Every structure is written in C-alpha cells, then in structure tokens.
Amino acid sequence: MKKVITYGTFDLIHHGHINILKRAKANGDYLIVGLSSDEFNEIKGKAAYHSYEERKLILEAIKYVDEVIPEHNWGQKIQDIQKNNVNLFVMGSDWEGKFDELKEYCEVLYLPRTEGISTSKIKADLLNNQ
Ligand code: C2G
C-alpha cells in the first residue's frame, strides 16, 4: 500500500483544497492529512475561521482523505513520515522546494496550485460584496 501525506490548514474548504487532496490520493492508496492545529496556525500567522475539530470533521468527510493527524509544528514531518511508513509527501506548488530535505525519507511531489481561489480571497470577496 502506497501511503501519501500532505499538510495544511484547510480552512473554509474550497475547490483548490479538493484538487490537491484528489491529486495527492491519486498518487497512492492511502492519504494522511497533517492538519494544522489552532495553536500552529497562530505560529503560521493564520487565523482560521473553523476550529481544528471543525476542520478535522470536514476533512474526514472528504472521500480522498483516509486519516487526519494534527500538525503541531514545522519539524514533525520526518517523524510523521517514519512513524506512518509514508512513501510520498505532496504539497501545492506554492511550497515548491521548501520541503526537499524530506527526499531523504520519501518521494516529494509539488503539484500546481489551483489558480484564482484561496481562503483569504474568499474572506476578502465576502467583505467587498457586503
Ligand atoms: N492549495 C492549492 N490551491 C489553492 C490553495 C491551496 O493547491 N488555490 C494547496 C496548498 O498548496 C497546500 C494545501 O492546499 O498544499 C493546503 O493549503 P493551506 O490550507 O493554505 O495550507 P498552508 O497554509 O499552505 O500550510 O507544513 C505545511 C503547512 O501546514 C501548509
């Protein structure tokens, strides 16, 4: 079984998130999502609308996702990869090259981001259309 892992905040789930999850899963048999905790989002400078528990519930309802684990910090990826016997690490192309050190532990694949959508764009558009 080829195990894939990806990480993110996945707030206000949109088609860009679905596209990366769909393509990540298409590259293996089992997809684990490292979901940023509320505390880690603060470190990342992201204010998620939905709490970790709400974002986890939503992700677990997506057919491409097999398992959700918490992402507490930048440095846990190697341990997650080894502990879960992960074969492939996938991220969107906005992270191109940022996680190449993981190539020592598994395949690393950056997939093109979905243009024209982001959680911050959704928030801005809603504000502007009020
Ligand atoms: N993404 C995408 N297309 C978009 C928006 C997001 O492909 N239009 C991808 C991102 O590239 C990322 C994933 O969806 O791979 C999750 O994006 P975010 O929730 O914004 O996560 P991020 O803040 O990038 O956190 O340790 C890694 C970090 O936790 C990544």
Image: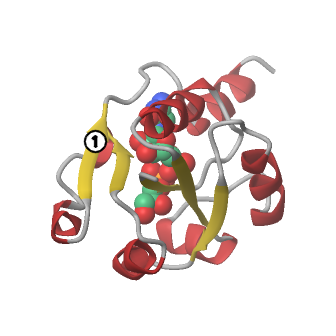
- Residue 35 locus on image (x, y percent): 60, 62
Identity, as a three-letter code, of the amino acid under mark 1: Tyr
Which image quadrant is residue 12 in? top right
Q: Kindly identify which residue carries mark 1.
A: 110
Image position of 105 (left or right of 48): left
On screen, residue 97 above or below 81: above
- Residue drawn 45% across the image and 55% down it: 3
Residue sitting nearer the eye, 70 or 47: 70
On screen, residue 125 above or below 88: above
Mark 1 lies on a secondary structure that is strand
Q: Which quarter of the image is occupied by the C terminus? A: top right
- Residue drawn 53% across the image and 31% down it: 22
Image position of 105 (left or right of 37): left
Disc 1: CA contacts within 10 A as few (<14), some (14-19) or many (>=20):
some
On screen, residue 85 above or below 23: below
- Residue drawn 48% across the image and 73% down it: 84
Specify whether tag 1 is near ligand 1 (CB below 8 Å).
no
Which image quadrant is residue 39 in? bottom right
- Residue 128 locus on image (x, y percent): 69, 22
- Residue drawn 73% across the image and 29% down it: 127
Residue sitting nearer the eye, 37 or 101: 101
Which image quadrant is residue 99 in? bottom left
- Residue 20 locus on image (x, y percent): 48, 34
On screen, residue 73 above or below 25: below
- Residue 88 locus on image (x, y percent): 34, 54
Residue sitting nearer the eye, 106 or 113: 106
